[in-house]
Image: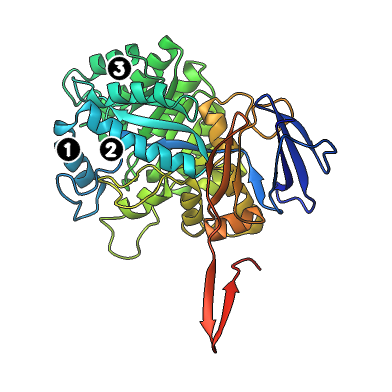
Amino acid sequence: MELVLRNARLHDNDYLVDIGISDGKFSEIKKNIADKGDEEIDLKGRFVSPPLVEIHVHMDAALTVGEPRYNLGGSLLEGIDIWSERKKTLTKEDVKNRVRKALKWEISNGVTRVRTHVDVCDPSFNALNALLEIKKEFKDYIDLQIVAFPQEGIFSYPDGEELMRKAMEKGTDVVGGIPHYEWTREDGVKDAIFAVSLGKELGKMVDLHIDETDDEHSRFVEVLAAETIKNNYLGKVTASHTTAMHSYNNAYAFKLLGWIKKAELNMVTNPLDNSVLQARFDTYPKRRGHTRVKEMDAMGINVSIADDSIMDPWYPLGLGDPLQAAFVFVHYGQMSGYNEMMRLIEMITTNPAKTFGAKDYGIKVGNPADLVVFDAPTAIDAIRLVSRRYLVIKNGNIIAQTKPYETNIFMDGKEEKIDFIK
């Protein structure tokens, strides 16, 4: 056996297990593995989960905060305007250098699958070409899905339909869209219809930025759900953001949730960005600006949490860590109950893995040996501490390791080591 991880805690079990890895796969998972491994690591009760999945991020814009100017008002629309200026100066090497750094952050945080939206409202396709090359460069460390994302609209941008088709021909994995940003309601409807139609035509998944607004009249998710059902494309379509749902009246919202479930839409919420981008026009009370996660989860709808941005015109912070987004959503989504926090771990692992279409995912004998070890004893402690990732393993190989830190307090002439675990 090549590697044995001793004393791991899975799913917050009261007992610890050993995890054996051979030929890049999980070979044994049980309370005590008798055989010695070629290498052994004692995890000392640390919490272990499948690797994190970053299901919604904009890698082409990562690390561009302040370029060419800062988003002083903090709004979504100002961010789009700034990005429209910045992307005029994009070069392939510029994009690749920034994405390399951001992806290494993701790996360090236990992420081994990333779905990135790439702006294709650019006839030169500089960003897309860069991401296609990065996808090959990082293939042994991160599975990268690329979404053809029409940031400025499909029907509100010159030759938008043609650019979308060209982007897909270049090797993009997922069809994107942005109905609420189109100039008119009619074009927004066409945007959603076009995306599902193109996805089915090409046999590709679909993932739309949709209803990312405070406007209660923005109701494009119903169109997306209807088209998904009509085209019998169940389970292959994702609705990202859907923040307008916080403004719908309850009668309409619960009717819509029924159609979302019937269409088997995958839903993605982005608490870091949308907590600061939404409700910019509100005085008081201020809306929270997120989709109805708890209600959807209770109905069995697949909901995931994602970062969205890493230091870009829309969000000046971020470090490529879905766990940080989950921590924010404990508060933002009022998910502080024990079972709710446990669900948050699934919303950054198994749920987005389903949206991603990941195969053989999970800590199970026979599956590829992919996992993340948190420097915390339980899932709840991992969230509470936004704990560092002690180990990240992909296909049986350690691809990231973070050394534990030590804090000491000096009081009354004595030095005391501080432990943040109860």
For the residue pair 37 and 24, the one nearer the viewer reads as: 37
Q: Does 357 sit above or below residue 70?
A: above
Residue drawn where x is 60% and y is 23% of the image: 359
Tell me the quarter of the image containing the C terminus. Answer: bottom right
- Labels 2, 3: front one: 2
Does residue 122 appear left or right of residue 388 in this picture? Answer: left
For the residue pair 161 and 133, the one nearer the viewer reads as: 133
Q: Quadrant of residue 207?
A: top left
What whole-number distance in Å separates the C-alpha atoms at marks 1 and 3?
20 Å
Judging from the image, what secondary structure is the residue with disc 3 in? helix
Q: Amino acid at mark 1?
A: Arg
Q: Quadrant of residue 62?
A: top left
What whole-number distance in Å separates the C-alpha atoms at marks 2 and 1?
9 Å
Judging from the image, what secondary structure is the residue with disc 1 in? helix
Q: Earlier in the sequence, mark 2 or mark 3?
A: 2
Does residue 337 appear left or right of residue 21 in this picture? Answer: left
- Give the numbered dot on residue 167: 3
Residue at numbered disc 2: 61
Residue at numbered disc 1: 86
Residue drawn where x is 35% and y is 34% of the image: 100
Does residue 102 appear left or right of residue 30 in this picture? Answer: left
Expressed as whole percent of the image width and height from the top left, the position of residue 111 reads 50, 38
Q: Amino acid at mark 3?
A: Ala
Residue drawn where x is 41% and y is 10% of the image: 201
Tell me the quarter of the image containing the N terminus. Answer: top right
Other-residue count near label 2 (Cα within 10 Å), few / some / many at <14 / 14–19 / ≥20: many
Expressed as whole percent of the image width and height from the top left, the position of residue 192 reads 35, 25
Q: Does 342 sit above or below residue 167?
A: below
- Labels 1, 3: front one: 1
Residue drawn where x is 31% and y is 31% of the image: 178
Expressed as whole percent of the image width and height from the top left, the position of residue 341 reads 60, 54
